[in-house]
Amino acid sequence: MLFDEGTPLARQDISVHNEQVPHLPLLKLCQLAIVAFVFLVATAETPPSPNESSVDEPVSLHVAAVLPLTGRYSQLGQAQARVLDAYVRRLDTIYNIPVELSIHDDGSDATQTISLIDELDSAHAVICCNHESVARDVLRAQSDAGIVVMTLAPFEDIGQLGLLPAWTFPYWFFTVVPDERVLLRAMLLDMSDRGVQTIGFMGLAGDFGEAAVTAFERMLAPGSMRVIVTERYPPDIRILTPEALWVATRQPSVVMVWGLAVDTRVALDALERRGFERAVYVNPNVYTQSGLAITSFEGVRTVLDNVTAENWRRPAALQLRLTTGERKATSAHTWDAMMVLEEAFRSALAGGNPAEVNDFRQRVREGLISMPPVAAATATFDYTEDDHVGIIPRSLVIVEVQDGVLTPLTLPASSQ
C-alpha cells in the first residue's frame, strides 16, 4: 500500500519528506537540480516535426457531400445527410477509421453544386447530385474535376447513351445508381436464362424510343434472342389496340414495353385486352419514379434494386435498415456510396498519405477501379476503366406481379 489510509494525505507527505530528505546546503541543491535538468534534456525524445506523423496518430480522411438541404429536393437531401452521418459514425466506432464529413447545402441548385465542388480543396472524395438533371449539369461543368465525384443519380440517360456507338465514361465521375442500359441488360439476362428466343418491342416514338430499341438490340448476342416485331407510338397515345393486336399475332416469347408511365399503362391494358398471356417486361422507372401501379397487371415483370425489392436477406441492405431505419433506395444509394468509397480508401491508405491531397485523390480513384466486387445494399459494384456505373446486372432483382403483389423471381446471393 502506497499510503496509510488512516492518515491524512498531506500529513503523510510531510512525514515522508521529513524522514528521507536530509538538510543540504543551498548551493548543493542548485547543482543537483542543474544536473537533473541536463539529464532530462539529453534523454528526452525529439518531438516529431510538423510534417511527420506518428505511427499511432489516426489518419484523417475527408468526404464532402454536396446535397440539397433546402429547396426543391430538401427532403431527399436531408435523409441522405442522416445516412451519411450514421455511416461515418459507424466507421469511427467499429473500425477506428476517422473520417471528416462535411455536408454542404446547394439549395437544390446545380449552379451552387458546381461552385461548392470547386471550393473543396481538402476533400478526398465528393458525394453529390441526387437528381439526374443536377448530375448531368455537374458532369458537363466538372468533367475534369480532379477528385472522385460519386453521384446519387445517373449522370447520363439512355437518350444520350443509346444512340452512341461507344461511350467513354468521364474520368473522375462514378455513380451508384443504375442507368437504363444496366436495367435493360438485367432483364435481357433474365429472358436468356428463361430460354426466350423472340421478343416484341413496344416503345415511344422519337429519340427516347429510338435510343432504347437501339441499345436493346445492341445487347442481343448474335444467334441468341432477336426482336421480331417493333411498334412505336407518340407519348400522348390513348388507344393502342391495333398495335397490341399486331404484336400479339406475331406471338413473340415475351414483349418489352419501354416508355413512360401513361403510355406504358395504355400498352399493358391493350396487350391484356388482346389476350396476350406471355410475360411482359416494363421499364422499371415507371414504377420506381413515376409510381405507376403495375401491380394491377398480372404477370408483368421488371427489375428492381435489392432495397426497393425489400430483399432484407442481403446483409448490407439489412444493415442499412437496422442502422438508419431507412427503407428507400434514395437513402440506400447514399449508404452504397460510402461502402464503395470505404473500400477505395483502404486501398489508397496502403501506399498513400491523405495529407498529400492530390496524390491521394488519384489513389482513391485507382482504388475504386481495382477493388474487388462490393456487395452493397442496392446492388453489387465492380467498377472498371470502361464502366463507372459498375453494377453487376445479376445482382439486381427480377420481380413479377403475382396476385397483385410484386414478387421476386430471382434473389441474388449476398455475395453477388
Image (cartoon, grey):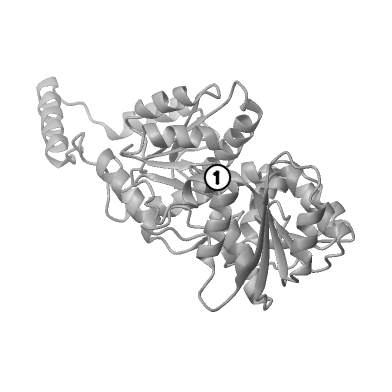
Q: Is residue 195 left or right of residue 179?
A: right
Q: Position of residue 1 (x, y in %)?
A: 47, 45
Q: Position of residue 65 (x, y in %)?
A: 48, 33
In the foreground, 76 or 354: 76
Amino acid residing under circle 1: Asp
Q: Is residue 276 left or right of residue 50?
A: right
Counting other residues with Cα less than 10 Å from the Cα at mark 1, is it few (<14), some (14-19), or many (20 or more)?
some
Q: Position of residue 341 (x, y in %)?
A: 45, 49
In the foreground, 346 or 282: 282
Q: Position of residue 180 (x, y in %)?
A: 57, 52
Residue 16 against residue 247 in the figure, above or below: above
* Residue beneath the point at 41% across and 56% down: 165
Residue 66 against residue 337 in the figure, above or below: above
In the foreground, 203 or 4: 203
For the residue labelled by badge 1, is the local secondary structure a helix, a strand or a loop? helix
* Residue beneath the point at 15% across and 28% down: 33
> Can you see residue 144?
yes
Q: Quarter holding the C terminus? A: bottom right
Q: Which residue is mark 1?
A: 207
Residue 413 against residue 238 in the figure, above or below: below
In the foreground, 23 or 358: 358
Q: Is residue 349 left or right of residue 311?
A: left
Residue 398 against residue 317 in the figure, above or below: below
* Residue beneath the point at 66% across and 28% down: 75
